[in-house]
Image: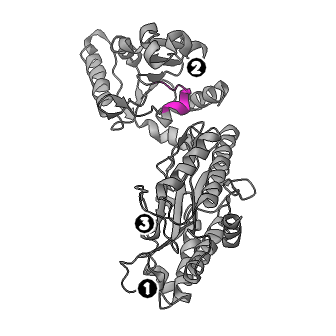
Amino acid sequence: MNTQEFTKRRKQLMELMGPDSVAILPAAPMRMRNRDSEFHYRQDSDFYYLTGFPEPDAVVVLVPGRAHGEYILFCRESDPDMEVWTGARAGQDGAVEHYKADDSFPIDDIDDILPGLLENKERVFYTMGASPDFDQRLIGWVNRLRKQSRAGIHTPGEFVSLEHHLHDMRLYKSSNEIKAMRKAAKISARAHSRAMQACKPGMGEYQLEAELLYNFMHQGARFPAYPSIVGSGANGCILHYVDNHSVLNDGDLVLIDAGAEYDYYAADISRTFPVNGKYSKAQRTLYDIVLDAQYAAIEQVKPGNHWNDPHEAAVRVLTQGLRDVGILEGELDKLIADQAYKPYFMHRTGHWLGMDVHDVGDYKVDTEWRVLEPGMTLTVEPGLYLSARHSELAKKWHNIGIRIEDDVLVTKEGYEVLSRDVPKDPDEIEALMAG
């Protein structure tokens, strides 16, 4: 993202906040992986969305109308000795020059400076509970001001969740954000295709995961957007299976749910294919049901429809399909009303997608499902999971887990499938694997 994009976002947020207000947002902390090793640092999505600043130990403060500059960034000072070990820091000069802060102060001085920014403000936009340690510091600053009330210092009287405005902004993707998401999806699609081509009986699930990670990185996506799911056989019926340690057996399906993160934006794609390159009759029957359900759901992604329309479309096709093959019995509408499909399809058909895989944004507004609008991005991911624990099922259906997931952008005319480059037609998948 260019600096103008971040500037525009901050301006929009401050207009929503109004005068006599201040917004405060801390950066994500470093996390330890083990005794002397840290996890690779990834900035908090909200913080990055407003600043583009990638370092820890930072706090952004927005003060609409402040004469000396509305955008203040507290961050680490430049430290040549530490930078030998851990790399360059922006410091105060870099915060202003490269990240366009109006003012920047050392993070170690925040206790002395930030309380003054709260003086005589009516509202503080801050999300309590997201960072408990910082919550206590903020409460301490406010209490310090309260003790100075006899000196005429006014203490903010209203605390407003920063998420309310910020997450609604993030729900609508700009052209630059859509460009990044297209790239993340294209990288991910190529990795899924490569995994299909590499798959063969006797491999480990983790070896297919290695194909994914290699292709993500090789194409410029340094990290996956989330831990990759590579579940074969019975493991494909575990929704969030991430152990990826089993052997790929001849005759089983393998379900891959994986996506790359590119420039802080996530892809999220699922495909299910036969380990030996050929669907069995039972596998193909259920796969076709899920694929039809996904097509029906995607057709419901368009401006004016509500969030739940794709889910309702998928549920109807899945329930009808299960009824057609004899797994469910009864009248279709009653089966849907009774949620008879739930033992085999127990999750929603999608979620918002963006900087976070399960991205921010309300699904309901005033108790009503949210209306889809251009710029929103979501996943469409129906599935069927028929494990051996379903003792009522004929054995031919056992341990067939199928999910087909694509990333979909709501456009002015309808929709764009961002992840369309990876095959999902079963004939195309078999041809790719045979080739």
Find residue 178 and report its horizontal and vertical position in percent: 67, 44
> Rounded to the nearest whole Å, what is the CA distance between mark 1 and mark 3?
17 Å
Quarter of the picture containing the C terminus is bottom right
Measured in 3D between alpha carbons, the distance from the residue under mark 1 to the one under mark 2, in whole angstroms, is 60 Å
Region rendered in magenta: 47-55
The correct choice, above or below, for 333 with respect to 381 in the image is below
Q: Which mark is residue 235?
A: 3
- Residue 236, image x, y percentages: 46, 67
Helix, strand, or loop for circle 2? Answer: loop
Residue type at tag 3: Asn
Image quarter (top left, top right, bottom left or bottom right) of the N terminus = top right
Viewer-nearest of labels 1 and 2?
1
Q: Earlier in the sequence, mark 2 or mark 3?
A: 2
Q: Residue at x 43, y 16 (%)?
A: 85
Q: Which structural element holds mark 3? A: helix
Residue 162 visible somewhere in the drawing: yes
Upstream in sequence: badge 1 or badge 3:
3
Residues 380 and 201: in front is 201
Viewer-proximal residue among 173 and 217: 217
**Label 2: which residue?**
99
* Relative image position of residue 379 (x, y in whole percent): 58, 57
Q: Which numbered marker is on residue 395?
A: 1
Q: How is the image coloured?
A: one colour
Q: Name the amino acid, label 1.
A: Lys
The answer to which image quadrant residue 390 occupies is bottom left
Q: Is residue 49 magenta?
A: yes
Residue 365 in view here: no
Between 213 and 383, the residue placed more toward the observer is: 213
Residue 281 colored in magenta in the image: no
